[in-house]
Image (cartoon, rainbow, N blue to C red):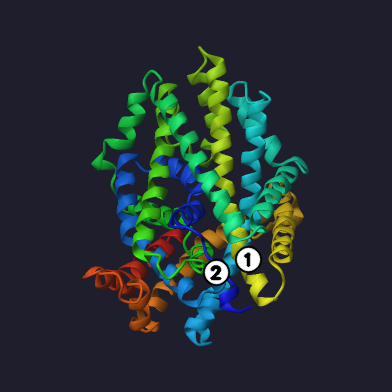
Amino acid sequence: MANSERANFGTKLGVILATAGSAVGLGNVWRFPYMAGENGGAVFILIYLFCVLLLGIPCMVSEFIVGRHAHSNTARAYRKLSGGTPWMLIGYMGVLTGFLITSYYAVVSGWCLQYMWASLIGHLQGDPAYFNDYFKAFSTHPAKPIFWLMVIMLMAYLIVENGVRDGIERASKILMPTLFVLLLIIVVASCMLPGADAGVAFLFKPDWTMINGNVFLSALGQSFYSLSIAMGCICTYASYFSKQTNLSKSAVQIGVIDSLVAILAGLMIFPAAFSVGVSPDSGPSLIFITLPNVFQQAFASVPVIGYMVSLLFYALLTLAALTSLMSLVEVSTAFCQEEMRITRKSATLLVVSAASFIGVFCSLSLGDRDALQFFGFSLFDLFDFVTGQIFLPVVGFLTCIFIGWFVPHKIVREEFTNWGTLRVGILFHVYIFLVKYVCPLCILFIFLHQFGLL
């Protein structure tokens, strides 16, 4: 397929909202709050913001450069820039990573949709033990999670098959502002609760005694996860950028939006949690087990408000999941469309069908079925482990080495400066230094830390 036939995003706003939508997802609304809760709140946030600036934005710019320069899907982009050398395997690994994440991410996205429905019909009411039993019964059920997985994958299909401008960009212009409005409504409701100031202080008043090596490395890992780096999304979306798109400015804007959503998610959750005496370090169960109980207790005097907050929260969670899910689907769709030379509709159908098929087995594996257990992991947890702890850091590390040491600096500079039309001064040299030395070293620390080697 010729490059001239590829679509571009239609507006600067579309570029920012679509790419920010790719980054803003469950990593911000689900993972960030519990990571902050486990790592000291305000201290973790400050280190996280530093890591976004130090690691996330340079890595994002690197993927932007690869994607826009090649104007192709992620695999072909690295193949073009590498000249067919083994470096091209980075692109294929990125596409594979994105596809595998799509398969199990769709399962969790389906949970969000189901919890929104459960909130709507009033099923999220009971004592703390009820919410624990409810989540366990639902997540291990052989059919219910699969139904919701199929529903949210159908939603992603209907968006992506309509193309870049009429599908992804148009949906992002609706979903992202709606997500922000819902987020702000719940933040205001949460911060008005009695005792909420303790939760606000937890997020914004640093306790410097909490600083240790684990907090630094956890913040580094979260910045990487939150910005959707190394899973093909950023590179694929950049292939739809115009030559006028300011890559460094766009990366900063997306980093700011992504971090703002993460911090607002903390403001949404922790004031309510502190208001009812729930520990901030409730871990991954925070969203599906702890929070329904928190919302019920916090608004016990006015149950209808608790009902509305719970419904809006899970609607927000579903939107966040969907914006990332459609970008993950797009990674593999662009690959199939260009490499297999088929229509976008056929490529999207193929990707959604294949990812849903694997997602079914990921969901079933959570029911302790022996046939779907591998090396002590359920299939769901195995995919999560392999992609999150191996593929993402490896692809990110290799991309930095590729851009910093292999790709001619003339090409990198041309993309960074929009062929000399942008005055960047020393900024380009700072970027090259970070990509050549700082980012690879930081990613290596993350990789070693996750295996207990640091």
Q: What x and y, as percent, mark residue 381?
A: 61, 54
**On screen, 78 above or below 396?**
below
**On screen, 337 above or below 199?**
below
- Give the residue at x 67% y 71%: 336
In-front residue for pair 222/6: 6
- Tell me, yes or no, whether the two marked residues, 1 and 2, touch with CB atoms within 8 Å: no
Number of on-image labels: 2
The residue furthest top is 301
Judged from the image, the secondary structure of the residue bearing numbered disc 1 is: helix
C-alpha separation, residue under disc 1 versus residue under disc 2: 10 Å
In-front residue for pair 412/13: 13
| Residue 199 located left or right of residue 233 | left
Report the quarter where the C terminus lies: bottom left
- Give the residue at x 52% y 59%: 388
- Give the residue at x 38% y 18%: 194
| Residue 115 visible (yes or no) | yes
- Residue 164: quarter of image: bottom right
Q: What x and y, as percent, mark residue 379?
A: 67, 56
Report the disc number at residue 276: none
Report the disc number at residue 332: 1
Q: Amino acid at mark 2?
A: Gly
* Crowd around label 1: few <14 · some 14–19 · many ≥20 (10 Å): many
- Residue 125: quarter of image: top right
| Residue under pointer 2 | 94
In-front residue for pair 113/205: 113
Q: Amino acid at mark 1?
A: Ser
- Give the residue at x 70% y 54%: 359
